[in-house]
Amino acid sequence: MNTLKSNPFSWINQPLQQKLVKLGIHNELDLLLHLPLRYEDETRLYPIRDIPEGKTVQIEGVIVDCEIITHPRRQLVCQLKDTSGVLFIRFLNFYPAQVKAYSPGVRLRVLGEVRTGFFGAEMIHPKCRSVHEEAPLADTLTPIYSTTAGVAQSTITKLIQQILRDSRNTDFLAETLPETILTQYQLIGFRESIWLLHQPPPDIAMGLLQNRTHPAWRRIKFDELLAQQLSMRMHYRQRRSYRAPVLQEKNHLTQALLASLAFDLTDAQKKALTEIKRDLSAANPMQRLLQGDVGSGKTIVAALAALQAIENGYQAAVMAPTEILSEQHYQKFLSWFAPLGVTVAWLSGSQTKKQRAHELTEIAAGNAMLTVGTHALFQEQVQFSRLGLVIVDEQHRFGVHQRLALRLKGSETNWLPHQLMMSATPIPRTLSMSYYADLEVSVIDQLPPGRLPVITKLIDESRRSEVVARVREACHAGKQAYWVCPLIEESEALQLKTAVETYTVLSQTFPDLKVSLVHGRLHAQDKSAIMTAFSQGEIQLLVATTVIEVGVDVPNASLMVIEHAERMGLSQLHQLRGRIGRGSEVGICVLLYQQPLSQIARQRLRIIFEHTDGFEIARQDLRLRGPGEFLGTRQSGIPMLRFADVQQDMDLLEAARTAAEYLLHDYPAAAQRHLQRWLGEKKEYLRV
């Protein structure tokens, strides 16, 4: 048997194998790494008289009475008696067979949470099994595993126990870490940890297992974090082995652009630009993440980086996630670059076939030194002459293979263009250390001088008329406003107002205003025309979906109303809020919410009301949602941690980072074995 990845389940029938795959289980080691979600204690019995309320315990007794009652609802109620007292057990959903099985005189062993009910101490829907007197208790805590349709707990338990027995004669649980690592970080053995977590002894501290702080859990979490760090560092080293064009600082075009600007760069922008310039001057491909809050000035930094490539005779490409943002970038780059004699191309879905063909020819010939577009940039027909720098805005919105495809556009043998990724969603340090460990990170952590924080107001839906009056007042004063809705079609489940309905109502409410509507399903050409009209002041009130979430820059728009703000995430609310207050007027963002509010919605609204700093909002967002949702991993392709929590296990993450470098330097073979155990074929997810 292979040391690390055992053979597929040749001894398990095909239908069951297919169901196990849904749980991410492809072989025997995967099954052993399918660790329990929680545990139940069936190793001891509690006398009914001594059972603590609110705790899950096991009790054994004899049924003395069992009947179906119909008030206040139909249910099966039984009385279970031991030598110390009586416990009621209730079943709100039950089968006729249960009525027969729980007849008086039957000895039952029940496990469940005890609470005080109408009749006294009771359990609702406990786990039950009939036993004979003196039936032996379990000799280990009972693990509870995640399951899928058609796979019972008992099935998973039997499979795991069989493999544990067989593992005595195999080496696929062999140690991958050298003794020095185990000693330095006080780690117990891998095999010992797996065995203990699947069959913990009855005297073990249940709390340490449940909150995953037991040494066995810490060993598993350390191994998982170490595999992640090893993969990141190996790909970082691999990338350093590629060649990239050396883009020296020449500073002719860059100085000309800086001289033409009506503002000076902030110290944070200058620092980020210095880091980027240094990377571009190296012979290895840059892979840097530029993160900064909404309105911090990432785009001008990206423009100056693009000019450094262009001054060296190389093309640059800017990829944006939406048509609207793509056009915004195109117009902005064109206004900066055209006076410098730099040709800017734009690839858009709104172009005619003839226009697109012309742009493609200019790009392929090397006449267009900067190209702006959406995901259309990585399509096969787009060919660059000498692509030296790829800039990806809002990088988390693109799939991992999309980013890679664009990057490979400029690649030759062992050669890659530089890559700069931008994000207005700040990444908290714990996530940056974990999921972006193979990237260099630059941070713009200050706003341009004079940029005033947007005032946020929380207003109940019942006060809608006040909001309408405020919008009319602002528009009559010469300002512009957004009215943002979360959906464009009615959803019975969510019962949200739609953008289409809202547009109709607001058009009737404001007959004296020019009201328009933009959403994601409009033709690209129509979206472009509407946004152009809005930016030129021809439209006073723009009803929109979250298609305007990123990149839209209309300085005269100083008021935003967001419908059903309680339904939106913190990052989305913060991004939307960043679309206003970009001129000389203070921006006001009205968050309309509808009662009743869930606890999580209440927390989100409080956070967005109290904070304007995107970094603090990101930290709070991570705390609420966890890394999976925060990073959008389904879109980004980043493999998630199954056991470790990067916030709770910060000490293990720090240790894993240090250990990864040590292993790669002194024990490269052990590092490969460890990676194979934990990631297998998934190592390629971290390629970009």
Image: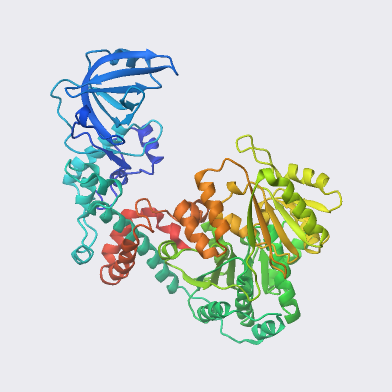
Instruction: Please state if 368 lies on the left or on the right of 660 as rendered.
Output: right
Residue 677, position in %: x, y?
Answer: 30, 54
Q: Within the image, what quadrant is residue 91 found in?
A: top left
Nearest to the observer: residue 663 or residue 83: 83
Instruction: Please state if 232 lies on the left or on the right of 203 as rendered.
Output: right
Name the residue: 59% across, 47% down: 566
Q: Within the image, what quadrant is residue 350 found in?
A: bottom right
Relative to 244, is 426 above or below? above
Instruction: Please state if 538 lies on the left or on the right of 601 as rendered.
Output: right
Residue 498, position in %: x, y?
Answer: 70, 43
Relative to 327, is 596 above or below? above
Q: Is residue 540 visible?
A: no
- Most extreme residue toward the left is 134
Nearest to the observer: residue 68 or residue 134: 68
Residue 23, position in %: x, y?
Answer: 39, 41
- Most extreme residue toward the right is 512
Q: How many marks?
A: 0
Name the residue: 24% across, 17% down: 63
Nearest to the observer: residue 571 or residue 362: 571
Relative to 314, is 426 above or below? above
Q: Within the image, what quadrant is residue 444 found in?
A: bottom right
Q: Is residue 198 visible?
A: yes
Residue 140, position in %: x, y?
Answer: 19, 38
